[in-house]
Structures are given as structure tokens and as C-alpha cells.
């Protein structure tokens, strides 16, 4: 099992996702009902995510979640599954996954990712007031994040869509000031 895990990781790091998938599939088959199953399922999800095959990635992240690993494993799998849902336009699925993460009481690093995806999903759904709330919490927690311009731009659009032209201008001026 360790050799298969290492071979899968080596192939993944080289970008040879097909070979990595073969190794992790073998490991998942061999590792039923063991802690290795969580790792194998998660890494299968990672491979399919890297290939932008989100439906397959969702399936494997779900298997990792169902295997009920430790808190960190669950947080990672829920977050990556939520990202897959986001990439497929399933914003309700994204928000459901993010809610599950919040119930696990994540640390600040995961919480920031939740706020980012939550804001983006709510924005896409036209829930501008809720998106603004998520964006503002994100900005409070990570004022120097690399995604600040994107967040401020969407914050401005959300405010504009709600008729708050001054608030939109304020958000966009912060982008220019950077």
C-alpha cells in the first residue's frame, strides 16, 4: 500500500494524472475499510480535479468524506468538493458543502476560503446582500490577500446591483489605490 501511495504521488507531482489515477484506484480497491481509503479517494479527487473532470472529482471527494477521516481530511475533502461544485455552476451544492465545513469549526485559513467561495457563489446566484457580507468578512480577515482586487470588483458590482452607487465607487477606488 505504501509503495502504491508513493507511486501515485510521484505520478501526480509529474502531472501524469492517468498513471496516478491507476495507482490510487488500485490503492482504494486494496484499502477498503482502512485509513488508506481516505487518502486514496482524496487523491483520486485531486487527480480528476487537476484534469478538470469535476463530476469524477466530486465522486471521489465524497468517498473520502463518507470514509469519515480526521477533521483535517474532512475539511480538505469538503472544500475541494465545494470547489468542484462551484466550477460546474452548482452554487447550491457549493454552499451546502461550505455549510458542512463551517459546522466542523475550521481554522482561519479554511474559514477565509469558505468566505471567498461563499461570496462568489452568492454573487453568482444574485444574492448580493449576502455576498457583500461574505466579501466584507473576507476583507476583514485577509486585507492583503492576492484576490483582493477580484473581491473588491465583485463587491462593487454587488453594491451597484443593489443601487448603492457610492458604495460601488468606493470599492472600485480601492482597487485603483492598490
Image (spheres, rainbow, N blue to C red):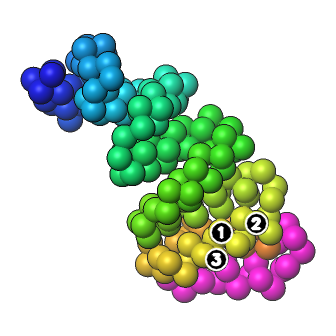
Looking at the picture, tell me which residue is in the foreground, 130 or 33: 33
Q: Secondary structure at mark 2?
A: helix
Relative height, residue 69 to residue 119 (above, below): above
Q: Which residues are magenta?
A: 160-178
Inter-mark Cα distance, 3 to 2: 10 Å
User: Would you say the residues marked 1 and 2 are in contact, meaning their CB atoms lie under 8 Å apart?
Assistant: yes
- Asked if residue 168 lies in the magenta stretch, the reply is yes
Q: Main secondary structure of the magenta part?
A: helix
Q: Secondary structure at mark 3?
A: helix
Q: Please indicate whether residue 118 sits to the left or right of residue 60 in the image.
A: right
Q: Position of residue 82 (x, y in %)?
A: 56, 44
Q: Is residue 7 visible?
A: no
- Asked if residue 43 lies in the magenta stretch, the reply is no
Q: Which residue is mark 3?
A: 136
Q: Position of residue 43 (x, y in %)?
A: 32, 32
Number of the label disc, if any, that sits on residue 130: 2
Residue lying at the far left in this picture: please name it. 3
User: Would you say the residues marked 3 and 1 are in contact, meaning their CB atoms lie under 8 Å apart?
Assistant: yes
Looking at the picture, tell me which residue is in the foreground, 147 or 130: 130
Q: Which residue is mark 1?
A: 134
| Mark 1 burial class by Cα count in 10 Å: few <14, some 14-19, many 20+ | many
Inter-mark Cα distance, 3 to 1: 5 Å
- Say which quadrant the N terminus sits in: top left
Quadrant position of residue 165: bottom right
Q: Is residue 35 visible?
A: yes
Q: Please indicate whether residue 147 sits to the left or right of residue 137 in the image.
A: left
Quadrant position of residue 27: top left
Residue lying at the far right in this picture: please name it. 163
Q: Residue at x 79, y 73 (%)?
A: 159
Amino acid at each position: 500500500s505504501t509503495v502504491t501511495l508513493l507511486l501515485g504521488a510521484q505520478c501526480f507531482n509529474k502531472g501524469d494524472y492517468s498513471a496516478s489515477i491507476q495507482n490510487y484506484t488500485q490503492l482504494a480497491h486494496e484499502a477498503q475499510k482502512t485509513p488508506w481509503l481516505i487518502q486514496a479517494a482524496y487523491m483520486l479527487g485531486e487527480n480528476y480535479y487537476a484534469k478538470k473532470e469535476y463530476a469524477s472529482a466530486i465522486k471521489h471527494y465524497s468517498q473520502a468524506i463518507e470514509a469519515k477521516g480526521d477533521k483535517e481530511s474532512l475539511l480538505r475533502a469538503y472544500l475541494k468538493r465545494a470547489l468542484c461544485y462551484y466550477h460546474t455552476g452548482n452554487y447550491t451544492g457549493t454552499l451546502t458543502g461550505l455549510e458542512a465545513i463551517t459546522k466542523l469549526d475550521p481554522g482561519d485559513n479554511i474559514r477565509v476560503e469558505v468566505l471567498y467561495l461563499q461570496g462568489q457563489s452568492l454573487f453568482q446566484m444574485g444574492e448580493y446582500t449576502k455576498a457583500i457580507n461574505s466579501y466584507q468578512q473576507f476583507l476583514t480577515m485577509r486585507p492583503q490577500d492576492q484576490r483582493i482586487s477580484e473581491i473588491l470588483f465583485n463587491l462593487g458590482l454587488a453594491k451597484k446591483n443593489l443601487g448603492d452607487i457610492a458604495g460601488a465607487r468606493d470599492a472600485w477606488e480601492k482597487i485603483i489605490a492598490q
